[in-house]
Image (cartoon, rainbow, N blue to C red):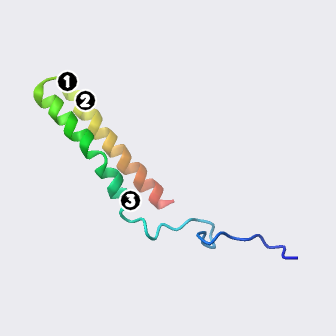
């Protein structure tokens, strides 16, 4: 009997999953924020909403960038 636990094929010896082929995933997630920013800019430009909406959209994008960076470093 083999007493050692089996490892998955995608798990490194340290127990962390590799991110080798996912270098562009963070940029893709940030790119998904672009339509929200465009809509917020258009609504502020037409006067439909105040500047706070644009600030909120920018903060959402910044939080997404920080989250993706933090996930990449783990």
Asked where in the image residue 16 lies, by quadrant, the reply is bottom right
The disc label shown at residue 49, or none: 1
Tell me which residue sits at (65%, 69%) in the image: 8
Locate residue 31, reporting x and y percent: 29, 51
Q: Residue drawn 37% across and 57% down? A: 26
- The answer to whether the residue labelled 2 contacts the one labelled 1, judged by CB atoms less than 8 Å apart, is yes
Looking at the image, residue 22 sits to the left or right of residue 61; the answer is right
Taking 2 as reference, is 53 left or right? left
- Upstream in the sequence, badge 2 or badge 3? 3
Q: Is residue 74 left or right of residue 68?
A: right
Q: Is label 2 in a helix, a strand or a loop? A: helix
Q: Nearer the viewer, residue 22 or 72?
A: 22
Q: Are marks 1 and 3 in contact (CB under 8 Å)?
A: no
Do the CB atoms of the residues marked 2 and 3 lie less than 8 Å apart? no
Picture layout, residue 39 above or below residue 49: below
Q: Mark 3 sits on what residue? A: 25
Q: Residue at x 25, y 34 (%)?
A: 55
| Real-space Cα separation, disc 1 to disc 3, in angstroms | 32 Å
Q: Nearer the viewer, mark 2 or mark 3?
A: 3
Percent across and percent down for residue 14 are 62, 70
Residue 24: give x, y in percent of width and height: 35, 63
Residue beneath label 2, please?
53
In 3D space, how far apart are the residues under numbered discs 2 and 3 (Cα atoms)? 27 Å
**Quick one: quadrant of the N terminus?**
bottom right
Vertical position of residue 47 compared to residue 58: above or below: above
């Amino acid at each position: 009997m083999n007493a050692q636990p089996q490892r998955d094929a995608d798990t490194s010896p340290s127990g962390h999953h590799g991110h080798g082929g996912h270098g562009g995933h963070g940029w893709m997630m940030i790119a998904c924020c672009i339509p929200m920013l465009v809509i917020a800019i258009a609504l502020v430009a037409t006067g439909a909403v105040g500047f706070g909406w644009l600030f909120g959209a920018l903060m959402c994008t910044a939080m997404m960038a920080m989250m993706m960076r933090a996930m990449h470093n783990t």
